[in-house]
């Protein structure tokens, strides 16, 4: 099968299983069952399947499965599940266990299904992983069913608290230090240690916020080591299968220090891939959307793939029904994403996998989820060429989120994802397209507003560039760090604030009422508050109980907005219309929303998402309703004609729209 040029909509077909295939209820039942499954997968509208094989998989069986896929015209995203070694491997190599900073080794027992289940630096694990890649790429390099390759799914350094302290990882770190530093005395001088030689170095176990400290060096190594492991796997594939495309599937961009995932290497990959598990609720639009927007911003020009997406009952709020599938699949493609793979198809060849969500049940195809998916796919196929060739509208709002900000926030255990998602949601719910600025900021970037979620993570040079940006007419929202008084004072001084007190209530959500500049109720401030002795600028919102400033407009023409509370995180927690109104009053009238929605009450605005994909083949408006009500809406994309439609409960719709000619 040739590489698909439109959008890919596929499903995981978990055969042959990796790592746990020896469990008898999962053993394959034969080619008749594979064919029956694959024929129904095709009937659902899927153009491809994603497989993941493990160290215990039979390549003969894999080859037969690929042949049947090719015969049926189904493409294959060829993946690996080498993170999931079987217990027999751990029994043979007990020193392969992952170890966290508290000395706990994983897996803890045979029923500990966490992964990684083996240290990626263990020599035998690495040898077997590499050999599997070599054998697979050599054998299937030119197989016509294979579309692309995925060398690892949801990688991390391991479970537990800040892994991996296994002897094999520590030994690798010692070698790395010896390569970078000329002598052990240089190590001791730099970090105040007293090691006798490189072989006696023990990495630190205490989190330290010093950006040049021993802890940071150790965790940077951990992230770099994981990246090298993944990129090395891609290199092996490409050496033995020249010309193929390969990537791996990320999860969390906000925990580099803990999980080792470094999204900032995405430009080195052939396509940008991430898992996508958000349920279908009030925050889904911003939580899911911000991840896709960050994925795209980190790898501009690359295709954005969501290669593991919820597809059926799972846990908590991710209990999917057809109505949820309609809303969330449409949202994925409203970002001009190129691939969406449901997790997962429950194959008839085996018993049900007991803890993982699935689109169909064992021995039963026609679930409500599958039937809804079939309808959703057929509806989207009409526009797949437009979506594949298009992109979202150019953003005028940006969130400045660098790798260093993530590191600085991680070192202080700041819930940076809540801040980022809250800021994203604020603008999204006001009708703006939002992008990310993940690398060096340019004062001439063309954005009209930039939000900074963690100002403690910017350098003096970056601060000067941002100041120049404001002087040239740009607007900046600068969040205080909300970590402690000293760090708030440090950032506050640079912003013209004299901070006297930092208050952080102890409760899952608590805070203060805020008034707008006219003295009327303006919303809620949650989680943290900073009180001031003095400040430059003027208050555009005040605390209702004290009259102290809550939002300060400073800088030229008040274009620098400084919240004295956790602004983004407050909106994340509440989605309250009052904060939207406060922000809207600060924005200039000339900054019209990218999409205006009429007919939905303010209280429900966060539950209705409207987005536009533009291409030379036309422009497609997506409207998604996560509320329990139908709405008669009028939607006005900027520069386009108005669209009137009925938006169904828990559903989605799309319309081709025309530009207004001038």
Image (tube, helix red, strand yellow):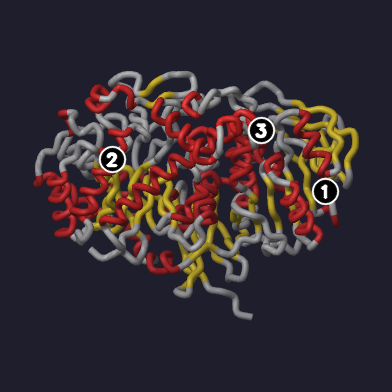
Q: Is residue 189 left or right of residue 24?
A: right
SS for dot 1: strand
Mark sitting earlier along the chain (3/2): 2
Q: According to the image, label 3 marks what residue?
A: 210
Q: Which mark is residue 10?
A: none
Residue 550 % position (x, y): 80, 38
Q: Is residue 303 left or right of residue 208?
A: left
Residue 397: x and y in percent read 65, 57
Instruction: Quarter of the image for the N terminus: give it.
Output: bottom left
- Mark 1 or mark 2, which is nearer to you? 2
Extreme residue toward the bottom, this view: 662
Do the residues under discs 3 and 2 have CB atoms within 8 angstroms?
no
Which quadrant holds residue 396? bottom right
Q: Position of residue 437 (x, y in %)?
A: 61, 54
Taking the spot 54% from the left edge, 23% from the top edge, the residue there is 196
| The label number, if any, that marks residue 553 in the structure image | 1
Q: Are the residues at dot 3 and dot 1 in contact (C-beta closer than 8 Å)?
A: no
Is 261 left or right of 213, judged from the image as shown?
left
Quarter of the image where one finds residue 339:
bottom left
Q: Residue 375 placed where, x, y %?
A: 32, 55
Disc number lying in front (3 or 1): 3
Q: Residues within 10 Å of mark 1 (few under 14, many from 20)?
A: many
Give the spatial CA distance, label 3 vs label 1.
31 Å
Out of 77 and 335, give the one closest to the viewer.
77
Residue at (39% x, 43% y) in the render: 229
- Residue 592, placed above or below residue 82: below
The CA span between labels 3 and 2 is: 36 Å
Say which quarter of the image contains residue 122: top left
Earlier sequence position, callout 3 versus callout 1: 3
Q: How many marks?
A: 3
At mark 2, the secondary structure is: helix
Query: Residue 129 has which mark?
Result: 2
């Amino acid at each position: 099968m040739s590489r698909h040029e439109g959008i890919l909509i596929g499903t995981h077909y978990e055969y042959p299983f990796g790592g746990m295939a020896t469990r008898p209820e999962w053993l394959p039942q034969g080619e008749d069952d594979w064919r029956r499954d694959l024929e129904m997968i095709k009937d659902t509208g899927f153009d491809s399947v994603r497989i993941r094989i493990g160290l215990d998989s039979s390549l003969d069986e894999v080859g037969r499965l690929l042949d049947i896929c090719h015969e049926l015209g189904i493409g294959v995203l060829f993946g690996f599940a080498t993170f999931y070694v079987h217990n027999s491997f751990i029994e043979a190599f007990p020193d392969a266990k992952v170890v966290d900073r508290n000395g706990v080794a994983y897996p803890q027992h045979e029923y500990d299904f966490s992964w990684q289940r083996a240290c990626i630096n263990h020599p035998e694990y690495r040898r077997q992983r590499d050999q599997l890649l070599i054998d697979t790429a050599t054998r299937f390099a030119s197989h016509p069913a294979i579309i692309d390759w995925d060398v690892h799914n949801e990688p991390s350094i391991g479970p537990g608290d800040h892994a991996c302290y296994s002897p094999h990882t520590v030994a690798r770190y010692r070698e790395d230090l010896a390569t970078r530093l000329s002598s052990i005395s240089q190590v001791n001088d730099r970090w105040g240690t007293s090691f006798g030689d490189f072989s006696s170095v023990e990495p630190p176990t205490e989190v330290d916020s010093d950006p040049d400290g021993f802890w940071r060096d150790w965790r940077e190594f951990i992230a770099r080591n994981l990246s090298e492991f993944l990129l090395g796997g891609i290199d092996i594939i490409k050496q033995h299968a020249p010309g193929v495309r390969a990537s791996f599937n990320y999860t969390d961009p906000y925990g580099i220090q803990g999980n080792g995932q470094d999204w900032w290497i995405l430009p080195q990959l052939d396509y940008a891939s991430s898992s996508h598990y958000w349920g279908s609720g009030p925050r889904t639009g911003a939580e899911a959307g911000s991840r896709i927007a960050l994925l795209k911003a980190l790898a501009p020009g690359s295709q954005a793939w969501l290669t593991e997406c919820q597809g059926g009952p799972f846990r908590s709020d991710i209990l999917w029904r057809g109505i949820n599938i309609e809303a969330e699949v449409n949202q994925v493609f409203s970002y001009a994403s190129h691939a969406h793979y449901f997790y997962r198809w429950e194959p008839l060849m085996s018993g049900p996998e007991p803890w993982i969500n699935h689109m169909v049940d064992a021995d039963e195809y026609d679930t409500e989820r599958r039937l809804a998916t079939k309808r959703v796919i057929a509806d989207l196929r009409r526009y797949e060429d437009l979506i594949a060739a298009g992109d979202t509208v150019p953003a005028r709002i940006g969130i400045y989120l660098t790798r260093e900000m993530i590191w600085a926030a991680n070192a202080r255990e700041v819930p940076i994802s809540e801040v980022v998602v809250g800021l994203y949601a604020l603008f999204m719910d006001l009708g703006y397209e939002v992008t990310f600025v993940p690398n060096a900021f340019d004062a001439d970037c063309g954005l009209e507003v930039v939000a900074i979620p963690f100002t403690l993570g910017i350098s003096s040079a970056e601060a000067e560039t941002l100041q120049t940006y404001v002087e040239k007419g740009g607007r900046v929202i600068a969040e205080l760090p909300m970590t402690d008084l000293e760090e708030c004072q440090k950032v506050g001084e640079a912003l013209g604030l004299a901070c006297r007190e930092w208050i952080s209530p102890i409760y899952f959500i608590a805070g203060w009422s805020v008034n707008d500049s006219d003295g009327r109720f303006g919303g809620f401030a949650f989680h943290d508050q900073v009180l001031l002795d003095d400040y430059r600028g003027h208050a555009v919102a005040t605390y209702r109980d004290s009259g102290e400033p809550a939002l300060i407009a400073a800088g030229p023409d008040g274009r620098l907005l400084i919240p004295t509370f956790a602004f983004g995180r407050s909106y994340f927690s509440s989605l309250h219309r009052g904060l939207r109104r406060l922000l809207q009053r600060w924005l200039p009238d000339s900054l019209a929303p990218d999409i205006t929605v009429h007919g939905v009450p303010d209280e429900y605005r966060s539950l209705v998402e409207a987005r536009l994909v533009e291409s030379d083949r036309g422009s497609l408006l997506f409207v998604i309703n996560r509320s329990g009500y139908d709405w008669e809406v009028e939607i006005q994309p900027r520069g386009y004609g108005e669209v009137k439609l009925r938006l169904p409960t828990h559903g989605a719709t799309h319309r081709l729209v025309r530009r207004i000619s001038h």
